Image (spheres, rainbow, N blue to C red):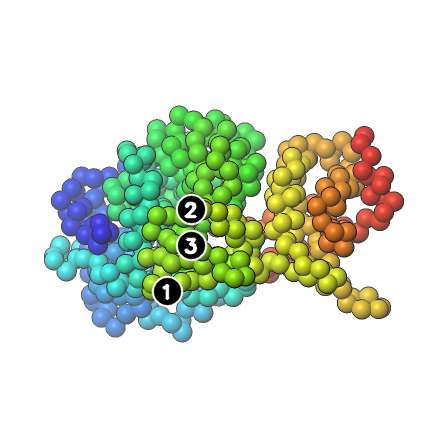
Amino acid sequence: MKMYGLVAALAQYPERLVSVDRRGRAHWSGEQWLAQVGRWRTTLLQQPDCLKVAVYLEDSAEFSALLFALWSCEREVWLAPNGLEGTVEQLRAHVDAFAGRFEGQSSLAPAQEPQPLAGAWCVSPDAAITLFTSGSSGEPKLVHKCARQLAAEVDQLERQFGGDFTGVSVLATVTHQHIYGLLFRVLWPLTEGRAFARNTVEFLEDLEHCALADYVLISSPTHLVRLPVHLPLMANSVRCVFSSGAPLPAGASEQVHERFGCDVIEVLGSTETGGMAWRVQHGQGASWRPFEVVQVRANAAGVLCIRSPFLADDQWYTCADMVRVEGPSFELLGRADRIVKIEGKRVSLEQIERALLAHVWVSDVRVQPVSRSSSVAERDELVVLLVASDAGSDQLAKVGRRPVIAELTDLLARQLERPLVPRRWRLLAKLPRNSQGKMRLADLDALLAAGDVAPLDSTELAAGSTKP
């Protein structure tokens, strides 16, 4: 696999452009990248007892040099989700040293002189890396992987998509400190000879100032679900947009296609599984196609199971997604852990969200169950956290909140039994998604604790359903 021999390949082609800055200007050549790997190796070889090293760097070029230096020195990489003091405290029990930018913690730094190039500069398939999940729970778990799994996925990405990306550079709105950015932003372009931007694109408006004529954008629903109004058409610059972290609403996918003039390739996966499947909604529908090396099936409960070279072993792995397998593709029906009982009736929260996202007034939405106590008993109810689209915002300005909510409630009432239709709603400017497009339960709980719209009664619903 190419990733193992990357150092030797760059030594052969030292003039190759490895990284660019946020405006697309040249940053490091292969020769400069190798020199920085050598400086980190000098530091590491002087610290033989530092076997497990926590890493957090915002600069993707510097990060990639440190990563390969650690692997070539047979050190275990612990990829921190951030450099905050709380994360440092959690990591201290697991690692021997820190490298990068951590709050209140001294860190290793590259030496002034690089360690000379030698045959030892290679990456073993067993080179270890530990990542943190970025799921919805407040306590991320550790996921241990090896270079073999990552290299297999890089090879698959190149086979699947690489033929369309000759000569492109790679820009990203997502961090390399999580599995998606690690693969798509750093390892894939670095292995295949495509320059990548060292800086994160914080806001899509920043793309206006990028001088690159041809690039791939690695992004997530956080940035794509509601594009900036003043974002210019960029059909001449963007070859393709990748999105992962959460399924992209169909309306958002179409808007990105219109604005950027290219396909949005969504990738379904997780820290544990790596990439499982992909789709392009524009002109092709909502079904997911497994990568050619990934086997999929639904178990007796309808839950997705996969077997993949991106996993630690060859066993079937049970995911958390309900699916309907249809020949070579499958349809996502929602997460198994997001099916709840309301007044004794089962309902998929994602089914409700899909119904709302199909409406032109809705840009983003989350449905959450909450428990409410009364003098009689405690009962579960559903709360809708909703972000209006531009059309929805216009309608809210014309008629107010209650008629809009009433129409959306009526939409759900045509698809759900009455006890399952949410009666509590909050309208928000945006949902609390992280850079991977995911929402933490703690952030959602904080929103719910701030109060919600009082439930609509039948009189208000009837009045609100009347068209202005």
Q: Residues within 10 Å of mark 2 (few under 14, many from 20)?
A: few
Residue at 40% across / 32% down in the picture?
A: 238
Instruction: Using the image as rendered, state which of residue 109 and residue 355 is in the foreground.
Output: 355
How far apart marks 3 and 2 lie (CA) works out to: 9 Å
Image position of 289 (left or right of 34): right
Disc 2 residue type? Answer: Pro
Residue 244: image x %, image y %? Answer: 46, 47
Disc 1 residue type? Answer: Gln
How far apart marks 2 and 1 lie (CA) works out to: 20 Å
Mark 3 vs mark 2: which is more N-terminal?
Answer: 3
Q: Which residue is mark 2?
A: 328
Which picture quadrant has residue 242?
A: top left
Instruction: Using the image as rendered, state which of residue 272 and residue 308 is in the foreground.
Output: 308
How far apart marks 3 and 1 lie (CA) works out to: 12 Å
Which circle marks residue 296 in the picture? 3
Mark 2 vs mark 1: which is more N-terminal?
Answer: 1
Q: Which residue is mark 1?
A: 315
Disc 1 element: loop
Residue 432: image x %, image y %? Answer: 58, 51
Asked if residue 179 is positioned above or below residue 329 in the image, the reply reads: below
Disc 3 residue type? Answer: Val
Image position of 44 (left or right of 205): left
Disc 2 element: loop
Residue at 75% across / 61% down in the picture?
A: 343
Which picture quadrant has residue 215?
A: top left
Which picture quadrant has residue 440?
A: bottom right
